[in-house]
Image (cartoon, helix red, strand yellow):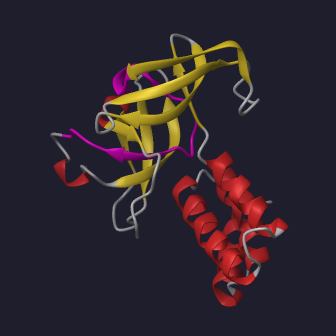
Amino acid sequence: FSKGCASDLRKEHKQYSDIETGRRLVIPLLREQHGIECRRLVAELIIKSLRIHGPDHDTTRDLQSLRETLMFVMVNWKNKWYQAARCKDDGDKYVLKGPISSPQGLGIISKGENTHVITADEAVIGYPGTPVICHGLTNATHLNEKIGDVRAIDAKTKQCEIHFEDTNLKPCLVKQTNLRILFELPAN
């Protein structure tokens, strides 16, 4: 798929609003690091599939499995890859599982898996496309509590380029210490 493909498929999905077109849109959205849009689309498709096909249909099961895959968030901690399973203490801490044997091997936990609880500031967001929420910004307070996708990560400055779900907001660089991973999306 080309970069323009997601845009074309978005138009087709809005026009026909069918499950199969929506499923075809997921991969281009992921390639373009549109994690929030992708998660929202899959949630919408699951609701449609449940209504049309029921809970035991292969399409519904495939979409539910896809939703679980999309929830897999990778972080780097102490130079090893971990799955950030959830947050606690209002997002100030992450529960990590791992380490992961390979960042490409989603879900493959190394032998001797451990669970760790670390402060959110200790983790390094691992991949573009990770949904995040801004917090603690002092110079751009209007961005606090705004959600967006990480589109690029600068390892040296520990800043992420964030593209906001609210398209009226311009993309900007935000320090990782001012970001929290968004495990569950708020309602639209």
Q: Nearer the viewer, residue 60 or 165?
A: 60
Q: From where the camera sits, is residue 188 visible?
A: yes
Q: From where the camera sits, is residue 2 visible?
A: no
The residue positioned 30% from the left and 35% from the top of the image is: 178
Q: Position of residue 96 (x, y in %)?
A: 51, 25
**Residue at the farthest right position:** 58
**Residue at the farthest bottom position:** 15
In the figure, is residue 129 to the left or right of 120? Answer: right
Quadrant in the rendering for residue 38: bottom right
Q: Is residue 49 above or below residue 106?
A: below
Q: Is residue 134 magenta?
A: yes
The residue positioned 73% from the left and 83% from the top of the image is: 52
Q: Quadrant of the C terminus?
A: bottom left
Q: Is residue 120 above or below residue 144?
A: above
Q: Which segment did they paint magenta? A: 119-137
The residue positioned 61% from the left and 19% from the top of the image is: 98
Quadrant in the rendering for residue 80: top right
Q: Position of residue 13 (x, y in %)?
A: 68, 80
Q: Position of residue 151 (x, y in %)?
A: 53, 45
Q: Nearer the viewer, residue 2 or 68?
A: 68
